[in-house]
Image: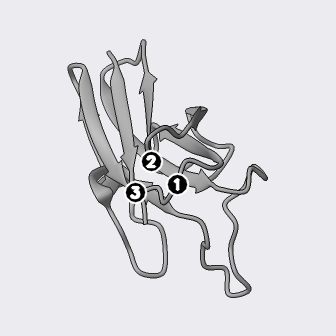
Amino acid sequence: MVLTVQVYGFGDNTGKTFVGLYRTSDAWPEVKKQYIGKVVSITNKSAVVSFDQLTPGTYAVAVFHDKNNNGILDKNMLGMPVERYGFSNNAREIFSAPSFNSASVDLSTDKAIGIYIK
């Protein structure tokens, strides 16, 4: 199976996009605990990444725009992200990441999804 993710909402083409694919809620959405992680370039204010050879099942995707290329999602003094980020299903919570279930995608055939980062 192939899951293709198109990420929109970049203000410009600087930096990179970090994309994490998760299979379980236990790891969600911890950086470095993803099932597969990829870093992709931004072109025309969007980014595309494909995950192939996946087994059927439930997955969730978390992305962030590493605008300054430092390899982390920068946060302010209150712990709030200052770089754009998003999740599959465009799931959002106000003060935390959405649940794995609200961001989950059922993969039983090849699928393409879009994520808008804010």
Instruction: Look at mark 1 in the image and give the residue it sits on.
Output: 12
Residue visible at 49% across and 74% down in the picture: 96
In the displayed structure, does residue 70 sit left or right of residue 56? right
Which of 10 and 102 lies nearest the eye of the viewer?
10
Q: CA distance from mark 1 to mark 2?
A: 5 Å
Residue visible at 38% across and 74% down in the picture: 93
Mark 3 vs 2: CB contact within 8 A: yes
The numbered disc on residue 118 is none
Instruction: Look at mark 2 in the image and give the residue it sits on.
Output: 45
Above or below: residue 90 compared with residue 83: above
Quadrant of the rendering where the N terminus is positioned:
top left
Q: Position of residue 64 (x, y in %)?
A: 55, 54
Q: Amino acid at mark 1?
A: Asp
Q: Position of residue 115 (x, y in %)?
A: 34, 49
Q: Amino acid at mark 3?
A: Gly
> First in sequence: mark 1 or mark 2?
1
